[in-house]
Image (spheres, rainbow, N blue to C red):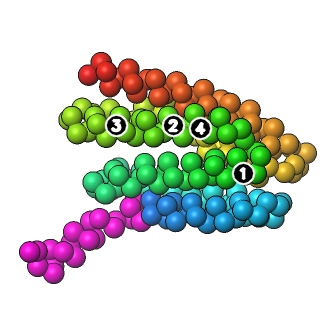
Amino acid sequence: MPDNETHENITEDLWNLPNKLSAVRLAASPVLILLLLYPGKTLSIIATFVFVLASITDWLDGYIARKSNMITVLGKFLDPLADKLLIASVLIMLIALNRVPAWMVALIVSREIAITGLRTVAVMSKVVIPASKLGKAKTVFQIVALIALILHYPFFGINFHALGMVLLWIALVATLYSGMDYLLKFFKK
């Protein structure tokens, strides 16, 4: 059994700043669900603000982890989990608000689950499938589309719902294309 000092060091390593930022992103999902239960302009603005802050932590935790060499096993699990949970929970809530078609959400969420499973199998098989630029672009399109769709209402003469739907179509294509790219990379290895 490890002594207290060893246990404290392990705990500190697990809960470094990047992992704490991922945990903040995890905590943002239920907050967004609550905010999106009650549609209206004010709560849409607040939900958009929460989503933007949570999305910034996605970039920030990765940047800090790489720059400060704080990459941990927990972080490799927590970061993508937080991303998927954040995106999926918002997409599902937007179905309930009639802001997005359920079939688009089903395709996006299915791809995310399938590729997460594939990457898990790859890791267990000692095959490394690094995140691709296409996968990162997919995430950016998803986030930008969701910002517009959460905001939803017209502001400053901009129809944010229409803009969000155009961006969601682009995100859907990028999501499916990057999913196929991961599959091809996995089966070539």
Element type where label 1 sits in the image: helix
Q: Which quadrant, please, contains the C terminus?
A: top left
Residue tagged 3: 119
Q: CA distance from mark 1 to mark 4?
A: 13 Å
Q: Looking at the image, do the residues carrying marks 4 and 2 touch, with CB atoms under 8 Å apart?
A: yes
- Residue type at mark 3 is Arg
Residue tagged 2: 110
- Residue type at mark 4 is Ala
Q: CA distance from mark 4 to mark 2?
A: 6 Å
- Residue type at mark 1 is Ala
Give the percent coordinates (x, y) of residue 113: 45, 40
Please give the count of numbered marks on the rendered protein.
4
> As rendered, which of 136 and 175 lies closer to the eye?
175
Give the percent coordinates (x, y) of residue 132: 42, 31
- Choose top left, top right, bottom left or bottom right for residue 73: bottom left
Tag of residue 106: 4
Dot 1 or dot 4, earlier in sequence = 1
The magenta stretch spans which residues? 1-20
> Is residue 77 found left or right of 150 in the rendered image?
left
- Residue type at mark 2 is Ser
> Is residue 101 found left or right of 90 in the rendered image?
right
